[in-house]
Amino acid sequence: MKQIKPIIVLVSVLFVLILLIPSMLVIPFSDKETVKLAEEKQSNPEPPQIASGPTVEVAVHRVSAQKIENVPLEEYVVGVLAMEMPAKFEIEALKAQALAARTYVVRQMLSGQKLKVPNGADVSDTVDHQVYKNNEELKAEWKGEYDWKIEKIRQAVQETQGQILTYNGEPIDAVFYSTSNGYTESSENVWKNAVPYLKSVESPWDVNTEKFHSEIEMPVAEFEQKLGIKLGNSMEVGKITSRTESKRVATVEVGGKTFTGVDVRNKLKLRSSDFSWERKGNNIVIQTKGYGHGVGMSQFGADGMAKEGKNYKEIVAHYYQGVEISTTESFVNKLTVKK
């Protein structure tokens, strides 16, 4: 039997090593890189994306540009939430607002009430409906704060995606406003129509927040002109004759006329219909509590509830009595047919 020559053995061993060494080096390196990339992704997560669903678009009248912009429903909610509630608010408050915004526009679209000018729009981008800005406009407005704000806004929309508020199986009129006076107002005290889910409830979380108190000073002549009355030289401005269950002014007698608190608020452009006043020389000093019509969800109240650990479902259940959280799925066919 022939002996194997040493030189052949040596060459064979070297050949095997040449094949193995690169693999021995690459495998540990690859594992380390994989772990590193995973750690980086965990510490710097990608902004939440709005998942795609059935194609439902909102025709938005862009008032300044005088054009209609067709926006996917969930992206529309992002643009509304970004403008209607501060991104600094708690995430659960933002989720409650996202639910209200989505419900509002779905109800509007189901109503079939298109804007006459321009023809075919579902909503405008102003306070007449809901304030809306697209992504490029938000970048320009938020500048250096864009990244964290849009990530938080998108998270709120994503985590409530496709959810709306319903009462007896129909989308509710999900009205909201800035700040209560400590109570929400029943709808019939503002718009005459009693709505079962828009009843007065306590909202103590608003008290002493940044928009709770306000004071304005108005010349007597301007006060008289706006209300269409004459005070004369009397130091007494008027007498509040009744208040609603929410402590807002129901009726007031001033200058020989009787007004509702809502009338006075609108005519004088007050922040709230919970007001008091006094005359100081040739001026009327008016103090108000709260900011907005008071019906439905208080935004500062929602933020206060979230700070106490309440989730968005508990928030909407408090402000909209007896409602349910449903999905847009059952309404999608109706919405797409109306397009």
Image (tube, grey):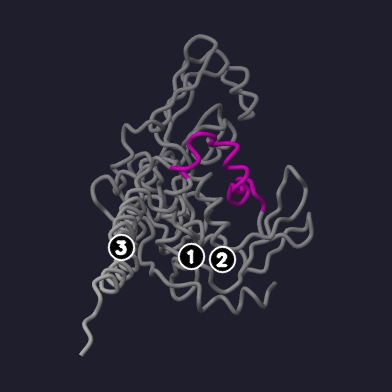
Disc 2 designates what residue?
A: 107
Q: Position of residue 287 (x, y in %)?
A: 43, 25
206, above or below 278, in the image? below
Amino acid on which disc 2 is placed: Arg
Q: Residue at x 61, y 77 (%)?
A: 334
- On the image, numbered disc 3 is attached to which residue? 21
Cα distance between the residues tagged 1 and 3? 69 Å
Q: Which region shows up in magenta?
A: 124-149
Which residue is nearer to you in this view: 146 or 222?
A: 146
CA–CA distance in space, label 3 to label 2 = 67 Å
**29 w.r.t. 53: above or below:** above
Mark positioned earlier in the residue sequence (1 or 2): 2
The number of callouts visible is 3
Instruction: Estimate the x, y position of residue 31 in percent, counting from the top left.
Output: 30, 60
The residue to which callout 1 is attached is 172
Residue shown at the point (30%, 43%) measured from the top left: 304
Question: x, y (%) of residue 37?
Answer: 35, 54
**Vertical comparison of 297 with 266: above or below:** below
Outermost front residue:
2
The disc labelled 1 sits on which kind of residue? Ile
Q: Residues at badges 1 and 2 in contact (C-beta under 8 Å)?
A: yes
Residue 13 covered by magenta stretch:
no
The answer to which image quadrant residue 183 occupies is top left
Task: Indicate left or right for 149 with 108 as reference.
Answer: left
C-alpha span from label 1 to label 2: 7 Å
